[in-house]
Amino acid sequence: MSIQSFLKSKYMLAYVSTIVFLLCSIVAAISIGSVHVPVLDIVKIIGAQIFHLPIMDQVKDMYVNIVYEIRLPRVLLAGFVGASLAIAGAAFQGLLRNPLADPYILGISSGASVGAVATLFFHLSIPLLGNFTLPVFSIISAFLTIIAVLYFARMADRTLRVETIILTGVIFSSFLGAFISLLIALSGDELEAIIGWLLGSVAMRGWSYVAIIVPFFIIGTVLLWMNAKELNAMSFGEERAEHLGVDVAKRKLLILLAGSILTGAAVAVSGAISFVGLVIPHMVRRLWGPNHVHLLPLSMLAGSGFLILTDLVSRMIISPRVLPIGVITAIIGAPIFASILLKQRQRK
Amino acid sequence: MLKLERVTGGYFSDPIVQNISFSVEKGEFFGILGPNGSGKTTLLKIISGILPVMEGKILIDGKEIHQYSRKKLAQKIAVLSQISPQAFSYTVKETVELGRYAHQKGVFHQWTIEDEKIVQQVMEETNTLHLQHATLQELSGGEQQRVYLAQALVQQPDILLLDEPTNHLDLAHQKNLLDLLKKQKLTVVSVFHELNLASLYCDRLLLLNNGRMQLLSSPDEVLTESQIKEVYQTEVRKQAHYDIAKPQIHIKPELDSSDESRWNIDASLLKIEKEKIVLQSPKALRTVSSGVVGSGIGWRSVFINRKVPPDYQHARPVKEMEGYLANFGFPLTQTVAMMTAVEMDDACYGFYEEEDFSVLTVVTAGIGNAIDSTKAEKPVPVEVGTINIWVFVNGKLSDEAFIQGVMTATEGKAQVLRELEIVDEETKTIATGTPTDSILIAATQSGRNFPYAGAATDIGRCIGKSVYNETKKAIEKYLQRKQKERHRF
């Protein structure tokens, strides 16, 4: 029983510290900016707007506007994108038994990017969707990509081995990357919009973007969560998982589907933000172990906090100019990842 | 329990195993053997449901395997494969817990007290409990395989399938793992690469050849020299295990042809000194011997007959002899050593050359306490007075020929004692030897092949004759010396 309490206390510490990290990130990101908003006022504004508490007495209207119309949706968007990318990354790494795998490797984000860039290039706008045209196209092309990747992988190898999936994903990524480059080369006035989108941003998207990602985030997360034990089994190899009683074909499909929903939606609302899906699960795994029952929620929380902080840094570091958030994640993420990788290899 | 009926299957459209039928009884340890590419692992994957059955049926408890859901099948069959590298550092406990998956219910697979109890119990049995917080990467190969065995056992299967479970394990870990499996009293179906391990642990063996059944029988019936030669295309020798009634298969390495140059054991190798007679062979000889050190059957290259004082008494003569040999730098594992109280000058030897073989026989004889083994009742106090016979054969002897060689040599010795009327002082009958006689037959195992060495064969007669001649000379010398000594006093 002492083991149980040890495990409990270990994960208790993990959850408490990760949640505290997330909350601090949220508060800091809302508070800090060209206009400083006191923490107490933030609590009051959120309390009043969401829970309709009568505590708005001494808060300035300007603060309400800044917090509720600008910073809160931005922070939430960053949080959901970070959470989606991190949990999808964790799942893909477990499924592909490769800590270097991430949503990008499967070509999903390239697919989503092609949809978005094409929307910008052709000035597509579907009347009913309006501003949502780009995210919707992006999610659709992400779906199409994963379906195509799986279809081709299955043609090459009917057992759908992980190696084949990775290889097919890499081939699709470069193929789709070429398309993006082609569109960029041919673009004129749209160039800035395309590049700006590709570099990734959660700025000035407003509540509507938050509303887009939330349903996909919930569906994807619940789907993955339901497959946490299966992910544990499958990270020991598909045959072993099958021997343990896992219906591998079905579970693999569900996990890939959930992963592409999460990635597609994240890429659609914020552009290509790299390294979050790679670094966050990796760090969580090193801190708290690879058990997906805890790895998935912890990655979700940590990824969320991480991207909120990153967004804060991106708008403060050379203020008043704003850096693309994808640049920051790559600058922070790549060296951290490299150093983790190096340590791991050296130990071996 | 498990029944295969004319099963054909493999990797899509390409049936690797064909027409396999057998059934495994509860509690049986069933082995599958065959050369690389014979379909052993494929067959196992078909049984575990990874690969499809194309024709025929696989029944578990009377029900076809495709009628079981994945989870239900996992409750019946668990699989222990070769250890493979693991990407993530799961702890031992987490790894074992995964084995309960097949028994867990609900969308989120609740962990129950029952699950915990089984895991604790199995981890104790497999001696992995103390490792539970360690990660898999921190463990040795043998420990990892024990953890995976625990994972398979918490599945509580009726049948355990093993795919070369001892691959990559060292000798001790191979033995420990298989002993542990044997103790579980499970029904086991295992693929083996190693014929000898399969022979030791399996009740029955299935030998596969090109995806078809070659033979299904007991290890003794399956592991025959001709069978293995046919299936594996390799020359092997079969021998009984030293301690248990199971066969063991030995391969014979292809020797360098320059090594095959003819060489003989003859009298020039013999060194007779005051204290000892030594024969050092340039190569090891297959030797059957009794003696103080190096007795039994084996390959030896140094042969020593050591003179000890007539009053030699030692609590641990073997230790003393080993010390003596070490003193002279003789390699213990390659030496046969005997002792005698006879003067080394009285040793007799002769080289007997026949058309296509030759024999060197060396005898030292003392008959101070000659005995008739067929009449004597109480053991005579052991004094060192003894007949030591060495027979070196330049030829190739079978095990049978070695035994017959010992017989004919003994007959030669007994004949001398009878002709010289050497009497057992106790029984007053003709003696058959002395209580401490030793014998050694050694053969170069090259040259002519001798399947037999009884009196019906030329080699048998040559051994008998040479032992007779040399023993007779040696005893006569001994008697003369005794007579001289008597005259002196």
Image (spheres, coloured by chain):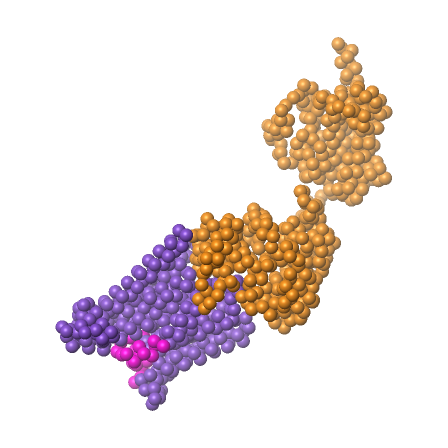
Q: List x then y, in percent, for residue A258.
A: 42, 73
Q: Is residue B163 magenta?
A: no
Span of residues in magenta: A189-215
Q: Quadrant of residue B356?
A: top right
> Relative to residue B426, is residue B352 depicted above or below?
below
Chain in orange colour? B
Query: Left of B109 or right of it: where is B261?
Result: right
Is B225 in front, or is B204? B204
In the rendered image, which quarter contains the C terminus of chain B?
top right
Q: Is residue A337 above or below residue B337?
A: below
The secondary structure making up most of the magenta span is helix
Q: Position of residue A83 (x, y in %)?
A: 34, 69
B418 lies left or right of B119: right
Q: Is residue B74 left or right of residue A280?
A: right
Q: Is residue A191 magenta?
A: yes
On the question of residue B130 being in view, the answer is: yes
Specify whether residue A104 is in view.
no
| Residue B392, placed above or below residue B108 | above
Rendered colour, chain A: purple
Q: Residue at x 86, y 25 (%)?
A: B419
Q: What residue is rendered at 48% in x and 70% in y?
A: A251
Residue appearing at x 51%, y 62% in the figure: B103
